[in-house]
Each structure stands twice: as structure tokens, then as C-alpha cells.
């Protein structure tokens, strides 16, 4: 009596070796969207009006008046005004060589070096923050794009310290951001399973 034998299972084809062209095609430098409320005056007044509204409500409850109505109306107007001034700025890290060149183009001034020494600093400042900060933000800015450098300088000069600090802080952070990933999202996996969907 003869027995039939199953043919040996075929081994899965070995994937082709990864080339440097493949690696380069995967490169995506970090990006970040920075939301800026351009009407900072309205935003600041909103906080004051929120406190005033709270006091007006307590006053109305105690005295049977309706002072809170006008405050609430003004608060809503300011919220709409501030929201209408919100702009999204998309920044993308530049290459490390471009960053080093940009730093070299904006060395610290003599006054900044002397000031650092007086503060007891052991090293000279890496760059002139007054000129390097706007230069880095402009170099990283993907959208909206200014027509030219002159237009960007006019924009930068019109910002408050807090507004330009948001852009500068985001720019320097994403420039040194790594691509390290944390563990897969357990919440996402649980939600997909609840819909009967397989997860990786």
C-alpha cells in the first residue's frame, strides 16, 4: 500500500535587500502646525471678561438685575473676533547641513559673547538669537509662505514676544525632534476590535 506524501511547503521568498535609495525615499523631516491667535489684544480681553461675567452673574443673582447679559454679549463678540484671527503655521525641520549653515550665517555678536562671559558662561553663545530665530522660522515655514524675506521680516517685527516665542520655540524643538516611536496605541487597538476589525 502506497501513501501519498504532501509536497514540501515552499519557503516564502526573501524580501529584496533594502537599498540606500529605499532609505532615502522614507525620509520625512518632522513637521508641526503652530496655531497663533493674531489678535492677542482680543484674546487678553477675553480672560478679563470671563472674570467680569462671573462677578456679574453673582451680582444679578443677589440683586435681581441683568448686568451679565451685556457682558456675555461682549464676550461672545470678542471670542468670535479672536477666533477669526487664528492662523495655522506649518513648520518643517530643515536638513542638518542647512541648519549648520544657518547658524554660521548668524554668529553671536561681540556684545552677546561678553554678556555671556559676565554671566559666568563657559561657552560662547551658539548664535545670535535676535537674527537666528526669525531666520530659522522663515527657513522652516511651509505654509503660509511669504512672498519674500522682506514680507517675513515685516511680519516678524509686528509680533509680540509671546507670539514670536511660540513660533521660535516650535521651530527649535522640531529641528531636534527624533523619529522615535512609543508603543502602539492600546486605545486604538481596543476601539478597532470593538468594531470587529483586526489590528496589527
Image (tube, rainbow, N blue to C red):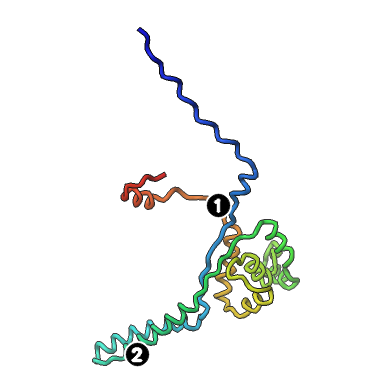
Q: Residue at x 70, y 66 (%)?
A: 127
**Residue 168: x and y, percent?**
59, 68
Q: Quadrant of the C terminus?
A: top left
Query: Which residue reaches farthest right?
Result: 110
Q: In this image, 54 relative to 140: left or right? A: left
According to the image, label 1 marks what residue?
A: 179
Task: Give the left or right position of residue 122, taking residue 85 as reference.
Answer: right
Residue 197 x/y as whole percent: 35, 47
Nearest the camera: 189 or 50? 189
- Give the answer, above or below, for where 79 lies relative to 33: below
- Is the residue 29 above or below the residue 5 in the image? below
Cα distance in 3D space between marks 2 and 1: 50 Å
Residue 104 x %, y %: 74, 63
Marks counted in the figure total 2
Percent x, y of residue 33: 53, 65
Residue sitting at 36 percent across and 88 percent down?
Answer: 71
Q: What residue appears at the point 62 percent right and 76 percent down from the top-left corner?
A: 156
Q: Secondary structure at mark 2?
A: helix
In the figure, residue 144 lies in which quadrant? bottom right
Residue placed at 43% from the left, 81% from the top? Answer: 80
Q: Circle 2: is it few (<14), some (14-19), or many (20+) Cα within 10 Å?
A: few
| Mark closer to the chain start, 2 or 1 | 2
- Disc 2 and disc 1 in contact, CB within 8 angstroms: no
Picture quadrant of residue 64? bottom left
| Disc 1 secondary structure class | loop
In the rendered image, the quadrant that contains the N terminus is top left
Splitting the image into 4 quarters, where does residue 32 fall? bottom right
Q: Which residue is mark 2?
A: 70
Please tell me how crowded label 1 is: few (under 14), some (14-19), or many (20+) other residues with Cα within 10 Å.
few
Amino acid at each position: 500500500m502506497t501513501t501519498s506524501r504532501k509536497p514540501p511547503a515552499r519557503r516564502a521568498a526573501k524580501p529584496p535587500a533594502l537599498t540606500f535609495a529605499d532609505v532615502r525615499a522614507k525620509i520625512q523631516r518632522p513637521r508641526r502646525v503652530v496655531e497663533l491667535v493674531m489678535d492677542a489684544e482680543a484674546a487678553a480681553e477675553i480672560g478679563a471678561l470671563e472674570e467680569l461675567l462671573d462677578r456679574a452673574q453673582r451680582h444679578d443673582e443677589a440683586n435681581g438685575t441683568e448686568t451679565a447679559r451685556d457682558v456675555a454679549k461682549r464676550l461672545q463678540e470678542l471670542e468670535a473676533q479672536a477666533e477669526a484671527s487664528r492662523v495655522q503655521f506649518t513648520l518643517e525641520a530643515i536638513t542638518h547641513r542647512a541648519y549648520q549653515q544657518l547658524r554660521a550665517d548668524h554668529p553671536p555678536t561681540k556684545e552677546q559673547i561678553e554678556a555671556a562671559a559676565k554671566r559666568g558662561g563657559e561657552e560662547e553663545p551658539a548664535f545670535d538669537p535676535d537674527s537666528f530665530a526669525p531666520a530659522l522660522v522663515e527657513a522652516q515655514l511651509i505654509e503660509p509662505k511669504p512672498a519674500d524675506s522682506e514680507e517675513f521680516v515685516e511680519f516678524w517685527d509686528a509680533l509680540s514676544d509671546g507670539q514670536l516665542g511660540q513660533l521660535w520655540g516650535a521651530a527649535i524643538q522640531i529641528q531636534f525632534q527624533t523619529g522615535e516611536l512609543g508603543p502602539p496605541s492600546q486605545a486604538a487597538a481596543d476601539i478597532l476590535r470593538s468594531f470587529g476589525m483586526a489590528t496589527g
